[in-house]
Image (cartoon, rainbow, N blue to C red):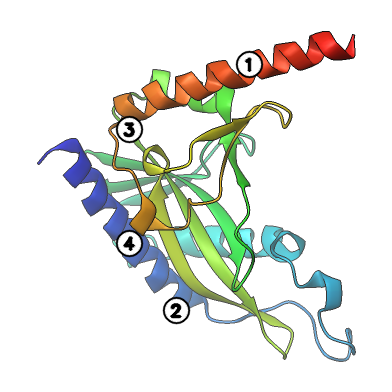
Amino acid sequence: MNNIDKVNKERLILQESFNKLIKIIGEIPIASKKAMPFGWRKAAKGRTVWRIIEEVISQNLELHSSELGFESVMPADSEVGVFDFKFLISSNEEAFVNIKSSVLGGKRNKDDISKSDGLIDFFNSNPDSNLYVATFVIDFTEDMTVQIVDAIVMPITWIPDVYINPSNNGNLQSADYKYVDRAIKRTNKEFMEVFLEEYAVAQSKKRKKQVVTK
């Protein structure tokens, strides 16, 4: 099995397991109509409730790891790294996953995926490891609960629109990381070639901007 086939198989395993997890979790109570008589209003945004949902996902991943088909689930030591969890799928198969949220029916925007320097360090240290972004799609219900309705898993190396924002801490950004049908199936090596080209462009733009502002 070549690397691309292996990644695609692993991606499907993760996506199926995460969608199974969604069914286990069910609706997540956030507030009540008594506490918020006028409904969600401006609070109906992913970032507003994401830290709570992230913790719900984290705890249930650890609790139900064997039921979901994993040998183990290990949270990252740092909250600012490029992945949130390391999954042991079999005795010799590791997968690293960064989890994000997306509001059902939301606009297509360029979102931050990861810090560029962190990605460079990760792939330098783990050249043969697979790194994924898992997007949990959430919906805000009228009874003041949040429902996770879908999980979409994309290998970071397959993101089609590789872009590094020179003005935003050098973050890798993408608008298409939730659309697997648009993926460009690259190996880690092929991705890093594209990524480092974009990284050089971003660094050049950053230096020019610094000169102008002096």
Reading the chain from its start, which is encountered first: label 3 or label 2? 2
Tell me which amino acid carries mark 1. Gln
In terms of secondary structure, where does tag 4 sit?
loop
Q: Is residue 60 above or below residue 39?
A: above
- Amino acid of disc 2: Lys
Residue type (three-letter) at the residue carrying disc 3: Ser
Q: Secondary structure at mark 3?
A: loop
* Residue, disc 1: 203
Residue at 53%, 63% (x, y): give it.
136
In percent of width and height, residue 139 lies at 62, 77
Res. 207 visible in picture: yes
Q: Which label belongs to residue 66?
A: 4
Measure the C-alpha gap from mark 3 to mark 4: 22 Å
Indicate which disc, 3 or 4, sits on the residue closer to the N terminus.
4
Q: Which residue is mark 2?
A: 23
Report the mark closest to the observer, 1 or 2: 1
Q: Position of residue 2 (x, y in %)?
A: 13, 38
SS for callout 2: helix
- Give me the residue at 31% from left, 27% from top: 190
Q: CA distance from mark 1 to mark 4?
A: 44 Å
How far apart marks 1 and 3 lie (CA) works out to 26 Å
